[in-house]
Image (cartoon, rainbow, N blue to C red):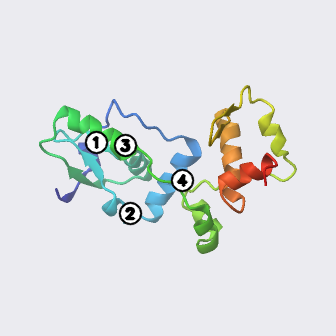
Amino acid sequence: MQTQTIKITQVKTNPDNPRIIKDDKFKSLVKSIKEFPKMLNIRPIVLDDNNVILAGNMRFRACQEAGLKEVPVIILNGFTEKEQREFVIKDNVNFGEWDWEVLSNEWDEADLKEWGLDIPTFNEGVDIDDFFEDVDEVKVGTNKIVLEYNDEDYAAVMGVLNNVVGSKEQYFFKLMGLC
């Protein structure tokens, strides 16, 4: 499989694409492509043998928005329908996590934000106890405590945990008064 450059009009969007990108994130992607188009050569759009996108739907839309006339692609020939569907999902699964300590010590925060990384923050004056008010049930096992949050509160709590010195487990032990 080799990267080649084709006219953007030859590329067909995938009607079954399971990923979306919205608003500011999309604008950031368009900006990123305009400012650093070489990245597309490293992460080309992946097509099936009918030029339908298997990976890179959002990059493709951003390329259109950026006004590109050609895009780098890789065409996967000979993949079965099942293999193509598996590829679509596996390409979009987020494995791993950011090491926030390394990012905070080795990278410039302004650059990270400019490049589109969401950096969790916790506003001063917000009481962490507020995040525990709506927990209906705390399930205690031999080695875990499970807390359930809506998406917005979860993101805020994870921001706190990622910015706290020490591990998440240590933070909860401190919070629960166990150390």
Residue drawn at (21%, 38%), measured in percent from left and top? Answer: 83
Q: Nearer the viewer, residue 131 or 42?
A: 131
Mark 3, residue position: 57
Q: Earlier in the sequence, mark 2 or mark 3?
A: 2
Residue type for callout 1? Phe
- Give the mark nearer the N terminus: 2 vs 4: 4
Q: What residue is disc 1 on?
A: 87
Task: Work out how far the residue at label 2 is from the one at label 3, CA to CA, in angstroms.
Answer: 15 Å
How many other residues sit within 10 Å of disc 1, few (<14), some (14-19) or many (≥20)?
Answer: some
Query: Disc 1 vs disc 4: which is toward the camera?
Result: 1
Residue under label 2, please give it: 39
Q: Secondary structure at mark 2?
A: helix
Q: Cα distance, mark 1 to mark 4?
A: 25 Å
SS for dot 3: helix
Q: Which residue is denoted by mark 4 in the rendering?
A: 28
* Residue drawn at point x = 33 percent, y = 30 percent: 15
Would you call the spot at circle 4 few (<14 residues within 10 Å), some (14-19), or many (20 or more)? some
* 91 lies left or right of 36: left
Q: Residue furthest right?
A: 125
Distance of mark 3 from mark 1, alpha carbons?
13 Å
* Numbered disc 4: secondary structure: helix
Which residue is at 39% across, 44% downward? 92
Query: Type of residue at label 3?
Result: Asn
163 shown above or below 93: below
Q: Amino acid at mark 2?
A: Met
Specify whether 83 is left or right of 69: left
Q: CA distance from mark 3 to mark 4?
A: 15 Å
Asked whether 133 or 110 is in front, the reply is 133
- Label 2, label 4: how far apart the Cα atoms are: 14 Å
